[in-house]
Amino acid sequence: LVHLSEGFDFLGFHIQWRRKRGTDKWYVYTFIADRPVRSVKAKIRTLTHRTSQQDLAVVLVNLNQVTHGWANYFRHAVAKHTFSNLDNLVWWRVIRLLQERHHWNWTDVRRRLTTPTGRWRPISAGEIELRKISAIPVTRYRYRGNTIPNPWTTATT
């Protein structure tokens, strides 16, 4: 038994009562718990060993499957910041893998992964591209009030 202001973990979510920023109103928020974040980071690290001999396309497919499946499960939480942090982790892990594999320094990375105008290209291997987790829309609970259907009332026609 805990007070809702302390929060509790349930099915990978951390549910907690907090004050909404900028207001005096209190709401129940659903965050991603620490354990699932540690778990997905461990999976990302196992898929992106620097000395891995797997083809880049296979690595990208596996990363996309793991991260997007995980993010689709947790998209109903307050997760945008966590998604962008994981994007950053995945991008740097793949960059370090490419640097080790091809003996690139930072100048080589920039030369190969930026456009002539200086914008970053997505990491890709042929048709397969590393997709961003933060592109997944976070959908939150929508308050419906008395518009929720009641199964006990009879429909009058």
Image (cartoon, rainbow, N blue to C red):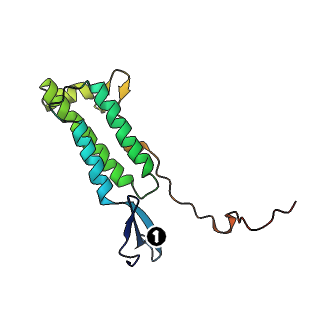
What amino acid does circle 1 point to? Answer: Val
Provide residue 114's location: percent of width, then percent of height: 27, 29
Determine whether 17 is above or below 11 in the image: below
Q: Residue at x 13, y 30 (%)?
A: 100
Pointer 1 residue: 28
Q: Is residue 122 visible?
A: no
Question: Splitting the image into 4 quarters, where does residue 92 fall?
Answer: top left
Provide residue 83's location: percent of width, then percent of height: 35, 49
Q: Residue furthest right?
A: 157
Question: Splitting the image into 4 quarters, where does residue 143 fall?
Answer: bottom right
Provide residue 31's location: percent of width, then percent of height: 39, 61
Q: Residue at x 46, y 70 (%)?
A: 28
Query: In front here: 90 or 66?
Result: 66
Query: In front here: 73 or 131?
Result: 73
In this image, 140 relative to 63: left or right?
right
Q: Residue at x 44, y 51 (%)?
A: 75
Query: In front here: 26 or 12?
Result: 12
